Image: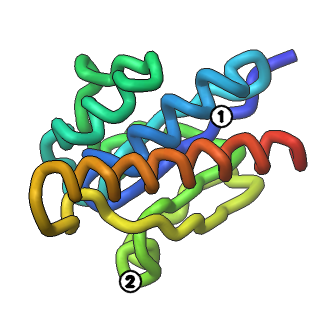
C-alpha cells in the first residue's frame, strides 16, 4: 500500500510545520509520508530545534522549503495542513489532486516574547499541542 502524502504549511517553515512533520513521520510513518514548506521560508528556529531534541527528535539538519516550489513541481498530496493563523492560511496555494485540506491553528514560536526561559516554556507548550494533535488525528484516519 502506498503511503498517503501530507504537506504541513506555515508561513516561514521554521517551527510549527517542522514539528508537525517530525511527529507525523514518527507516529504515522508506516502509513504517511510528511513534508513541510512555507509561504516565505525563513531559517529554522533554534529554540524549536532545542525543544524537539529534548524529546529525542533531531530536526537540526532540516531545511526550510518553499510551498510555491512544491506547487510548481506539481507535487500531489492527500492532505495539506496549514498550521499557522487564519490570515496566513488563506495565502496557501491550492494543490491539484488534494483529497483534504485542513487548518490546525497553533501559536507561532517566533513571535514569543520574554526571557529565553519563557520562550522555551511557550515553545514546549506548542510542541506538546502539535504532538497531541498528530496523535489524535492518526486515530481518526
Where is residue 26, by image quadrant? Answer: top right
Mark 2 vs mark 1, CA separation in Å: 25 Å
Residue at the spot x=36%, y=18% of the render? 58
Front position in the image: 113 or 102: 113
Q: Earlier in the sequence, mark 2 or mark 1?
A: 1
The residue positioned 37% from the left and 25% from the top of the image is: 54
**In this picture, residue 30 sits left or right of residue 37:** right
Q: Residue at x 69, y 26 (%)?
A: 27
Does residue 4 appear in the picture of this structure?
Answer: yes
Q: Residue at x 13, y 42 (%)?
A: 43
Q: Where, by quadrant of the figure, is residue 63 drawn?
A: top left
Q: Residues within 10 Å of mark 2 (few under 14, many from 20)?
A: few
Residue 6 placement (x, y as % from top left): 62, 40
Residues packed near mark 1 inside 10 Å, few (<14), some (14 to 19) or many (20 plus): some
Mark 2 or mark 1, whichever is nearer to me: 2
Residue 119 placement (x, y as % from top left): 22, 55
Q: Is residue 64 above or below residue 103?
A: above
- What residue is shown with label 2? 87
Mark 1 = which residue? 5
> Picture quarter containing residue 46?
top left
Amino acid at each position: 500500500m502506498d503511503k498517503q502524502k501530507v504537506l504541513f504549511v506555515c508561513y516561514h517553515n521554521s517551527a510549527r510545520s517542522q514539528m508537525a512533520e517530525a511527529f507525523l513521520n514518527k507516529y504515522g510513518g508506516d502509513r504517511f509520508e510528511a513534508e513541510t514548506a512555507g509561504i516565505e521560508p525563513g531559517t529554522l528556529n533554534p529554540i524549536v530545534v532545542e525543544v524537539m531534541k529534548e524529546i529525542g527528535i533531531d530536526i537540526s539538519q532540516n531545511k526550510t522549503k518553499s510551498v510555491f516550489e512544491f506547487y510548481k513541481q506539481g507535487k500531489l498530496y492527500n492532505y495539506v495542513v496549514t498550521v499557522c493563523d487564519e490570515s496566513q492560511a488563506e495565502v496557501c496555494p491550492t494543490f491539484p489532486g488534494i483529497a483534504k485540506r485542513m487548518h490546525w491553528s497553533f501559536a507561532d514560536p517566533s513571535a514569543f516574547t520574554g526571557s529565553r526561559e519563557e520562550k522555551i516554556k511557550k515553545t514546549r507548550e506548542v510542541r506538546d499541542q502539535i504532538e497531541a494533535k498528530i496523535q489524535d488525528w492518526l486515530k481518526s484516519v
